[in-house]
Image: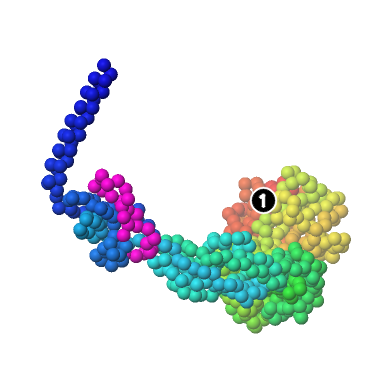
Amino acid sequence: MKRKTFYKILAILITASLFFGACTKEKSNVRLTPKLSTTQVLNLKSDSATVVGYVVSEGIGFTEKGICYNTTAGPTIANFKVVYSGSSTTATFKVILASLKYATKYYARAYATTGTETIYGDEYTFTTLSVAPKITTTVISSITGTTATGGGNISDNGGETVTARGVCWSTVHNPTVADSKTSNDTGSGTYASNLTNLLGKTTYYVRAYATNKIGTAYGTEVSFMTLVAVPTLTTTAITNITAGGATSGGNVTIDGGADILERGVCWSTAAAPTIADHNSSNGTGKGVFTSTLVNLDVATLYHVRAYAKNSAGYGYGPEVTFMTFPNQIYALGDGTTAVWDNNNPVLIEQSSTPGIYIGNLTLTASKSLKFILTVGKWQPQWGQATGQPAGTLGVNLGSGNDPDAITTPAANGVYKVTVNLGTMTYKVESAYPSALYMIGDGVGDWDWTKTDLPMIPVNSHPNLFWKIVWMNSSGNFKFAPEKAWGNDFGKLQDEIASGNVADNTGMIYTKGGQNIPVTGTAGYYMVVVDLATNKISIANPKIYLMGNTIGSWDTANSAGLFTVDNTNGLVTVTKTLAADDLRMYVWHSWFTDWWQSEFIILDGKIAFRGTGGDQTRVGVTAGSHTVNLNFKLGVGAIQ
């Protein structure tokens, strides 16, 4: 049974072989003309490409096929070729062309060899990709503590224009253009580079670099060590300026690779001072130090530099300048009485604090104001710092640009001008407060919530305030521009008043910080404060009638004088009056015109003119009238 099966299978195989053999022989008798095609280029790179060939028809068959190529048209197998070594049963075949030159145009054709000839497919062209430049790094030379010379040589631009080149360096290996670098023009060839701002006694690693559109290439790394460099340091801004001294200093940030043997500041009236000029000595080592400049001349411009010394020599910080405080400065500008005449400026004296100058100036609204140091000279000159907030002082000490002008306030008047050369600021404010209050147990209480004693401003005299006030038999009092502590004032320490309350000017004190004692006798008193002269007067009250009711417009006419009745707390006058407006005023020798301290009785209350305009008129009929005034309660009556 097994033998029968074997013979059957063998018979089938023999029959199949005869059949297929007959078919093959029949096919070979109808062969087509051999033909190739070059179809495409794949995976194009700077040094290789994959070229695809296609067998359209193979005729009697090929003994070899592949791709031939050259940098000129019409490549043949006599040029460069790559033989296809893959499967021969497929029509498509691919070969990799290697070791190509970058950025080069190539011509490629598929080829196939029969027994008697070689046929070629269509020609196909492609250009290999460009590469980054080829560059070498120059050996470092001309080494100092902070500089050196390097460079590079671009021998090949990689097929693209070199757009940047130079050297890069770092204190660690393999520096890149992200580190310190130079920029040395463009193109191929040799170039030199200057390495700057190096640290002393430090090892650096350097590579030349070149950049084209493909990327950045680097040369071989070289290294070198700098020499010891002079120290690097900063100069501290000038502070604590006086007429003869100032404070500065420095900060030694880099020692240059050697110990700091000496440090300090040097100064001169000329630029770029050195240790050959005036100098201080402030220890050794790195870090911050403070220096005192002494024996300076008043109102003099100085140049200052910090210095530090090591084995390589002296290093200096940046130069700063300052001026010692003068004893006075001057104001001018079309907002002042001096206008722009620097031969006739307005004097502003230095206050008790060095560098701060305070003066009361009469200013014209919305005009210009500046300050100068010396009569007849435009520099040094101070004004508004250009581009800075109002109140910031700018200066031209003689070699720069003049500062902007300060714009005066929007209203004409007397203003307190403060110039601070220490903080380089200025302030223009009303010279006098708009209000003034009394406080103290001599006139009421020391508690602001329990005492309300506003003084009356004298019309047209912003420096003058007055008040008729009831003083107790004992106690003290002070003044303040607001109902609060902080800017309060009284008299000078331990000052004894000049004059007495019965005098025309009264008892006089000088403005200061100490409490003012009451007179010792309870009653009404006229208190006048002159902020222009810083004087305070305490006098017996003088109240007068004025005008047609008494037949006189003369100031301080005794015919209109009121009587002070301290027993009843009244100021009173009884007099036969003509029919007209009843006008009243208080008087002091510091006043200039009666109406500036005028008041009326309106609806039973005393109404003061103060800084206002003409008041509502209150008339009386002809005949005898008594006028009573109670300044403690602020009320009055006409009978």
Residue located beneath label 1 in the image: 606
- Percent across and percent down for residue 81 are 31, 60
Question: Which residues are drawn in magenta?
Answer: 81-106
Quarter assignment of residue 161: bottom left
The residue most toward the top is 1
As rendered, which of 396 and 92 lies closer to the eye?
92
| Residue 338 seen in this snapshot | no
Element under disc 1: strand
Q: Quadrant of residue 181?
A: bottom right
Nearer-the-camera pick, 608 or 405: 405
Sort mark 1 into few (<14), some (14-19) or many (20+) by Cα contacts within 10 Å.
some
Residue at the front extreme? Answer: 3
Q: Is residue 252 left or right of residue 4?
A: right
Which residue is depicted at the point 75% across and 51% down? 485
Q: Report whether residue 135 is seen.
A: yes
What residue type is disc 1 on? Answer: Ile
| Along the line of sight, the residue nearer the viewer: 465 or 506 | 465
Q: Position of residue 480 (x, y in %)?
A: 73, 54
- Residue 541 drawn above or below residue 567: below
Q: Residue at x 79, y 70 (%)?
A: 261
Question: Vertically, is 38 above or below 225?
Answer: above
Residue 96 in the magenta stretch? The answer is yes
Residue under the image location 38 percent in, 63 percent down: 102
The total number of labels drawn is: 1
Quadrant of residue 543 in the image? bottom right
Q: Position of residue 145 (x, y in %)?
A: 67, 72
Residue 507 horizontal/vertical position (percent): 82, 62
Quarter of the image where the N terminus is located: top left
Identify the residue at horizontal 23%, vertical 52% (top origin): 62
Side of 281 relative to 349 (left or right): right
Q: Is residue 362 magenta?
A: no
